[in-house]
Image (cartoon, coloured by chain):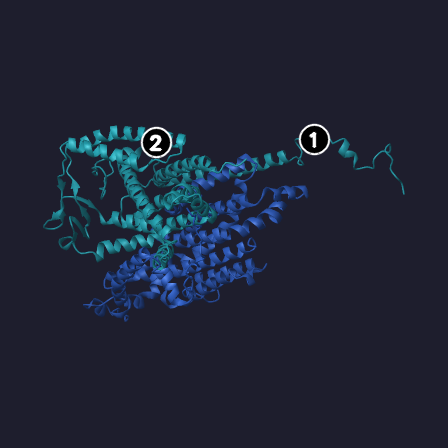
Chain colours: A cyan, B blue
Amino acid sequence: MRRFSFRDTPPEGTMAQDNPPKKNNWSWRSQAFRGLIYQVIAITVIAGVVWFLAHNTLTNMRVRGIQSGFDFLGQAAGFDIGESLFPFDSGESYWRAFWVGVTNTLRVAVLGIVLATVLGTLLGVGRFSRNALVRGLCLSYVEFFRNIPVLLQLLMWYVIMTEVLPMSSEAWQIGHFFLSKGGVNYPIPVWQTGQLWAAYGLLPGLLLGWLYRRWAVARFEATGQPRSMVVLPLLIVLLASLAGWALGGAPTEFNFPKRGEFAIENGGALTPEFMAVLLGLTLYTASFIAEVVRGGIASVARGQSEAASALGLNKAQEMRLVMLPQALRVIIPPLTNQYLNLTKNSSLAVAIGYPDVVSIANTALNQTGRAVECIAIVMLVYLTTSLGTALLMNWYNSRSAIKER
Amino acid sequence: MTTTTQTTVFQPIAARPAPVNTEGALAWIRANLFGDWKTSLATIVIGAVLLRLLPGLVDWAFLSAVWQPSFDACRADGAGACWGVIVEKYRVIIFGRYPFEEQWRPLVATALLIALLVASCIRYFWKAWLPVLWVVVLGLFFALMYGNVAGLSQVDTDRWGGLPLTILLASLSLVASFPIALLVALGRRSNLPAIKTFCTIYVELIRGVPLISVLFMASFMFPLFMPPGVKIDVLLRVLVGITLFAAAYSAEVIRGGLQAVPKGQVEAAATLGLTYWQTQRKIVLPQALAMVVPGIMNNFISTFKDTSLVTIVSLYELMGAMSLALNSDADWRPFTIEGYIFIALIYFVFCFSMSRYSHWVEKQVNKSKLR
């Protein structure tokens, strides 16, 4: 046995620790080099696949004589659209037809989001009710609507709208509202210049409300006295616009729908297609939002609510100041996902003939044969919405995340 | 003046009443239905509404319903739901346009596939030979459905339909999307910028558009992508579309699991000298995948429901087959709503049992965290 002394040369192999070999950046042993190679391979493969597909597409288009390009957007559409927010006739361009489709999509999506949020929140909170009947109803609602495909639900509502409801000559009437196979008819206020005064009143109202709220927040932060920071400013805005409306002569004339010979005449109308899409999307998404809300509330630790009551906060303050801010942090990201899902699901309207952007694109595709362009437009519309929302969410998340270390 | 000292006499407070019964049905009703006046009011109002609506519904669905397949009876006054339409048409609804005499084949094939799915959910079967079983059963499924072997006549895919198609689309796209999702999820967390960018673009692009536009792409644009002369079956095209779509969503779920694995685990693996793939395979993925089972299960439920969209690109899965069965027959057409209720029930049974299973798995996974 040989014992090492300090002066001895170390045995072979440990030498490396004293004198590391010169690093070779261009060797297979270098992680960075390997990474570079992998990436080059990935880029080559993907570029190759894209080139292959594009080449095939161009060849096929040439062989079949398919024209390409977005120039068709300027041509006359040649088809009518069942409903639109602004007048449209078949002589107008494809470009405007797509625009009608986008507005129709947004109309049903925005209304659906508002209604689904209200219903979903109620159902989600209802899961914590002390009343067993309420709990049971909310649970069965969620399980029922969540487990049936949304397309099936849309079609069912459409059948109910168009076959179970009475003819428009025998429409059900509640007050000035009519419900029939022709859809829903409702009174609309007649436009008069007096109503413009309400808008004039709204502007100073907004300013006043904002000023008051700023003062109230500053006061709260200086003295700790809580002041109404939401209800009172909103009340100021409302009162100001009401005052403006009264100054303008308080016009109250309505355009009431009434029974005509063949259909309900006058008033505003919602088509059965719109109603079916709206109902189907709202009820389906509400069941998911209910689960999101339930999860969010359940995620707040029990001790938080106990601590809040120990500090002497009442139930409303406890909810507003302690529970909600913590629950919302959990709720909002999945809630946005549900909003996006609702918007994307509105594309199913094509199955029942509601003229949303997909349905317009489908018609345009059948008429012009430009599949690539039409599908690209649809994807672009939805991508813009989704990515825009995603950016907004990332900003919100980074703002509301718990600051640690 | 004399000072009077006040003597306090001990006075016991009144004894508390004996606790009311807190067990049993009566106490449960008292606590859960008539706790205070608000709860009682809600109970009474909801009870009244239910009492008003339920009898009519029960009457329509069961008491005055017509069960025999005769549309004269269904059209009679006072007749409720016409379940006769299901009795008459159930074979078209469930098997679509599959040749009538051969329908035992999709029946056996579907039963096999469902049995396989159920088996995959049971811990006893989580063995190395399960993937082999999948390959065998899927092979059998295709052999039975397509035929042209063992004396079975050939049935082209455009005649497949109904429930077999729904289950096939859902389970095949789940199985096929899983490896893609795994790679994409790892890629999104990779240090290599090009790979990370590709994976991010793929996931965000797919998640940003509705499934229907992907299906339109599969049915209208896919033929343009292929070299001239190559024709790909529409079923396969749609399957590819759904798979790519499902993969993006699963990738995000898996990424969530990967993020939840503590960083120390990876560092420890690096200290032990494991390579990247060894680290992922032996350290990270076993922990991450256990966490994401409920999420994957939810994705499977969504995919199962989403398969109903292929009816828009004219494949006759469960819902397309239903429309096919009723729209072609003017006599039965007025009873579409009963048909919808029937397939809604089928979807509900599948999706509900899957979501129960997912709850059960979640509990199993969380068991290790409880103490």
Q: Is residue B96 visible?
A: no
Q: Residue at x 35, y 49 (%)?
A: A120
Which secondary structure lies at badge 2?
Answer: helix
Q: Earlier in the sequence, mark 2 or mark 1?
A: 1
Given residues A69 and B271, the one toward you in this image is B271
Q: Is residue A288 left or right of residue B198?
A: left
Residue that numbered label 2 is attached to: A216
**Chain containing mark 1:** A
| Whether residue A286 is visible | yes
Q: Secondary structure at mark 1?
A: loop
User: Residue B193, position in %: x, y?
Assistant: 54, 34
Residue A24, by quadrant, is top right
Q: Nearer the viewer, residue B133 or A327?
A: A327
Picture coordinates of residue A370, whole percent (x, y)? 33, 40
The reply to whether dot 2 and dot 1 touch (C-beta < 8 Å) is: no
Q: Amino acid at mark 1?
A: Lys
Residue assigned mark 1 = A23
x and y percent of residue A192 in the render? 14, 34
Residue in the image at 44% along x and 62% along y: B145
Q: How far is disc 2 from disc 1 in space, using C-alphas?
A: 65 Å
Q: Is residue A106 above or below residue B92?
A: above
